[in-house]
Amino acid sequence: MALSHNSPALFHQGLPARLRLVVAAVSATLLMQLDYHASMTQPLRQGINTVLYPFTELMMMPRDILIALGESLRSGQSLREEITKTREQEIARSETLLAMDKLRSENDNLRGLLALQKSLPGATLAAEVRAARPAPVHDVVVIDRGSESGIKAGDPVINSAGVIGQVSRVFPLTSEVRLLSDKQLSVPVFLPRLGVRGLTRGITGEDAFELRHVNLAASIQIGDVIQTSGLDGLYPPGLPIGIVTSISESGLSPFPVVTGKPVASVAVTRQVLVLQSRGAKQ
Amino acid sequence: MTLRETLAREPSRRLLVYSFLVALLFNLWPWPHQFPAPDLVAVLLVFWSVQTPRRMGMTVAWLLGLVMDAHQGVLLGEHALIYCLLTYGAIALHRRMTGFGPAGQALHVAGLFLVVLIVGGVVNWFADSTPLTLWILVETIVNALGWLLVHRLLLTILKRRPASRPARPAKIVS
């Protein structure tokens, strides 16, 4: 049309930039909604992570080489010391193990007498922490075992000191583990000294957790031991979680604010154990 | 516009692709927790959007963002949104920025990063009520410094490229 107000563009330039931004922003927001509310995006995430896997491994190589070099350079003296220490620990533990074997058979016997279900020792899988997820808003680490090794989302992860966290996402060759200090992880716990139950909730970035819904009347003290209660059927009961580090009155809620510190840390040892016994989804 | 920029040639497609690959590998490096490493992919998106706005697009930014989301284990779409905003902002600012020297341009980049990181912080706040922290300022400064470095390095490369090879005015992803 000769009298048209909009003169046609001389060159084809596609959609205007502002419209393209709107399309991109809306699609990104939709994807976030999908990812947040449904697990439909899991295959997409798995696909990208599987393609990225060789590259992330490649980029971790210099660090791994440095670690290996550091270990090979350690003097024989310190290695000998470590061997002696480990042997002493082994002897000390063998005693406990023997006592535990006896207790377990006794316990099975009693449970049989009471017609209760026997507590089954489940399969475990050793894994190593590869890296921490760099996002500062989450306390998540990546371990070197995935669905190929039979890991499922929700599996508890422990080391020799106690509970570390829980598997949150599984990829074919790696998995993400949410640490106890991650805000999105809650574990039902038990304070053996007082016999009170509660729930942990991580405080991201502080290597600590909050103890929620504990009994108002309980006289919690700093240093109290916190263990898993096993009420969720996911964690075996009685695993060490941490110790109480501070108690303060909260202004708003009737519950006191109790914070604790995890006893197990991935900063010290990188070897962890995944408990595959229950394997139920979170 | 500095002399360096005037003399800079149109980058080849290969340079664009390789620079993004290097940036992606840099971002995959296992940085220690809370180490203020610049997001080199974002920095590069800003740099190329200013340098050759016609050849950068939302699609590249969106897809690169998705890759970073999957790698960092955050909500899929978070980085996609941030990278698209950065690209748009950089393309919108590219004419204005040519009137400044590197330091002035870095200030523009810092402002752009600050705005976009605040948007990202708000998204995080909606997603899992993570409060906005001053960490954003640290990230802004680190990324602006990263931009200065990338700016210097890539302009040197662009200036040195032989003139015999004509630049192809094609986009990476249409």
Image: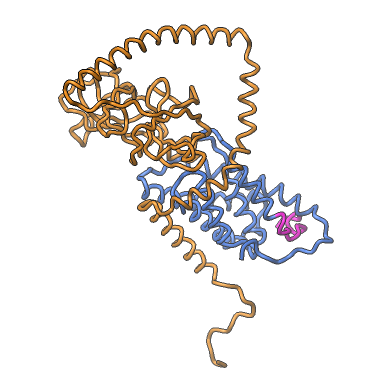
Chain colours: A orange, B blue
Q: Is residue A106 left or right of residue B82?
A: left
Nearest to the observer: residue A238 or residue B89: A238
For image coordinates 24% across by 30% down, the residue present is: A198
Quarter holding the C terminus of chain A? top left
For image coordinates 48% across by 49% down, the residue present is: A45
Percent x, y for residue B119? 44, 52
Q: Is residue B133 left or right of residue B86?
A: left
Nearest to the observer: residue B123 or residue B149: B123
Magenta-drawn stretch contains A76 = no
Question: In the rendered image, which quarter is residue A102 located in?
Answer: top left
Q: Which residues are magenta?
A: B1-15
Percent x, y for residue A62? 64, 32
Magenta-drawn stretch contains B2 = yes
Question: B61 above or below A259?
Answer: below
Question: In the rendered image, which quarter is residue A72 located in?
Answer: top right
Percent x, y for residue A31? 43, 57
Q: Is residue B7 left or right of residue A83?
A: right
Quarter holding the N terminus of chain A? bottom right
Question: B8 above or below A216?
Answer: below
Percent x, y for residue B161? 80, 54
